[in-house]
Amino acid sequence: MTVTSMTGFARAAGEQGPWQWAWEVKSVNARALDIRFRTPQGHDRLEMAGREAVSKIFKRGSFNLSLSVQRGDAGEGDRPMRINKPLLDQLVAEASRYGGKVADEPPRIETLMTVRGVVEPIEAPEDEAVVGERMSLMLQSLVQALTALNAARREEGGRLKAVLHGQLDELAKFRMDAASADATRPQKIVERLRTQIAELLADTKGLTEDRMHQEVALMIAKGDIREELDRLDAHIASARELLDAGDAVGRRLDFLCQEMTREANTLCSKSGDIELTRVGLAMKAKIEQFREQVQNVE
């Protein structure tokens, strides 16, 4: 299985008699499922069924669904027409008012009749069964667009999965670098502890034996990063499992990013060595890159 991206675009068209329509659907990343419709007047009834169609296929993402509808030329010559007399009278009055100022002759009536809105078709009421059939066909076109969008998101998700696995490989390498750093080797830890204990013993004023034991225990705990590295290993393994499982894993991957960042921060805070600090900072940068890509996973 593969993960699914939240980014994609698709288009589907259909027709019925003189009517043609086209759906354009696009999605981007979002924390939840956000659906926005844009349909021409008279097509509001499509929205509820359209929302249900989206929610059946997708779990996360911000969706924009746009429907464009137009009536073709089929049967145009047989449609009754009417003249918008108020608009035509206004145009005639304005033409007379500016007569001779713009041109020698005022515009002819044939010219004024070509102005948009002067001559309008009379829309005869359609049979409700025909309208219902057209709405059903429009919904079928929408489902086709959503299916294509889902395929596009999965294709993008396949490429995204490869990128995320590559980043996890780099993160695992940083983890190995941290584990093999000189500062984590037993002899180096012992040497550092001896130096710190010697500094404590050099200033014995006000330092009781119990306090010294506490300070030594704190030094040992602060110098040991094995727990952080083990937890980081577990988080990397969990992230790989989620990527291979597919489905809607974006939120769980985002949670793992938070946990990995916490371990990297702790590692840096414990570091008393430049090399280990450098690895910890590189680890944090790689986790942030991983997190940015995870924001696109459904």
Image (cartoon, rainbow, N blue to C red):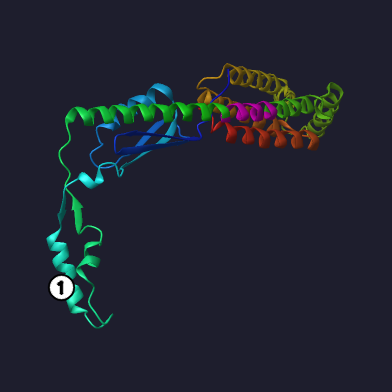
The percent coordinates of residue 291 (x first, y second) are 59, 33
Front-lying residue, 289 or 165: 165
> Does residue 262 appear in this view?
no
Front-lying residue, 164 or 137: 137
- The residue type indicated by label 1 comes to Ala
Residue depicted at x 54% and y 33%: 295
- Mark 1, residue position: 93
In what quadrant of the picture does the N terminus appear? top right
Front-lying residue, 204 or 33: 33
Task: Provide the major secondary structure of the magenta segment.
Answer: helix
Query: How crowded is the residue under tag 1: few (<14 C-alpha within 10 Å), some, or many (20+)?
Result: few
The percent coordinates of residue 284 (x first, y second) are 67, 35
Residue numbers of the magenta segment? 156-167
Residue depicted at x 24% and y 79%: 105
Residue depicted at x 22% and y 76%: 106
In the visual, does 198 lie left or right of 99? right
Q: Residue furthest front?
A: 77
Residue 134 is a magenta residue: no
**Figure check: 269 above or below 113:** above
The percent coordinates of residue 79 (x first, y second) are 19, 45
In the visual, does 227 lie left or right of 108? right
Q: Secondary structure at mark 1?
A: helix
- In which quadrant of the rendered view does residue 270 lie? top right
Residue 160 is a magenta residue: yes
In the visual, does 65 lie left or right of 288? left
- In which quadrant of the rendered view does residue 124 lie? top left
